[in-house]
Amino acid sequence: MTLVELMIGMAVGGLLLTAVVSLSMYSGRSLAGLANYVDMNSDSRIALDRMTREIRQSGYLTGYQTNRLSFIDFDDQPLVYEYHPVERVLTRTKTAETEILLADCDNVTFQIFKRHPIEGTYDQVSATNALSSKVISMSFTCSRTLLGVKMNTESIQTAKVVIRKN
């Protein structure tokens, strides 16, 4: 075996090794991104399901801002959902006990509507104050960084919930 053959063999081996390492790194990042997305989607569904259930059972809405909802719950206790943009968390507060419902939120928006739709459409009339509202619209997006890069974002979650009491 000559020196030229050895150099060619090392070059081919180096290229193959580079390809295998690149493929492994790409596959690892993709798998981590997929697991991250599944985790965020699961957390979002759990938070949305809980909020939907509690809003439907609440007595009425007492306060409204685009990032904060205040209710009197079915047991006559205050219930508050609030988005904190600096911390990127959506919290639930009931009887002075605060818990994080959803972390890593990029945006959370609440809207309020009256119960009856606009005639001939499925659109609701925007409520002018908290006491006149019967429909709550919620939407949020979440994302995380993966290996130092904001790699994937969970798709937007949206729901309209009707307050059933009163």
Image: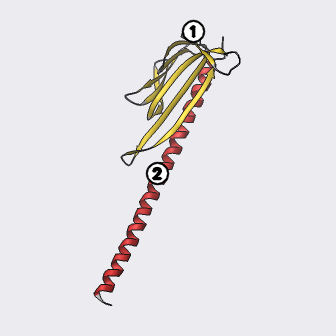
Residue 128 spot, x, y in % from top left: 55, 10
Kindly identify the amino acid type of the residue bearing the numbered disc 2: Ala
Q: Count neighbours of disc 2 (C-alpha within 10 A) and say few if under 14, some if 14 to 19, many if 20 or more.
A: some
Q: Is residue 9 left or right of residue 101?
A: left
Disc 2 is placed on an element classified as: helix
Q: Quadrant of residue 130?
A: top right
Residue 12 spot, x, y in % from top left: 38, 76
Q: Nearer the viewer, residue 21 or 48?
A: 21
What residue occupies the far right of the structure in this picture? 120
Q: Which mark is residue 32?
A: 2
Visible residue check, residue 131? yes
Visible residue check, residue 74? no
Q: Is residue 119 left or right of residue 70?
A: right
Determine the CA span between mark 2 and mark 1: 45 Å
Rendered view: 38 above or below 76: below
Q: What residue is shown at x 57% (from left), y 26% (from top)?
A: 51
Image quarter in which the N terminus is found: bottom left
Q: Count neighbours of disc 1 (C-alpha within 10 A) and say few if under 14, some if 14 to 19, many if 20 or more.
A: few
What residue occupies the far bottom of the structure in this picture? 1
Disc 1 is placed on an element classified as: helix
What residue occupies the far front of the structure in this picture? 120
Q: Which mark is residue 131?
A: 1
Rendered view: 108 above or below 39: above
Kindly identify the amino acid type of the residue bearing the numbered disc 1: Leu
Q: Earlier in the sequence, mark 2 or mark 1?
A: 2
What residue occupies the far left of the structure in this picture? 3
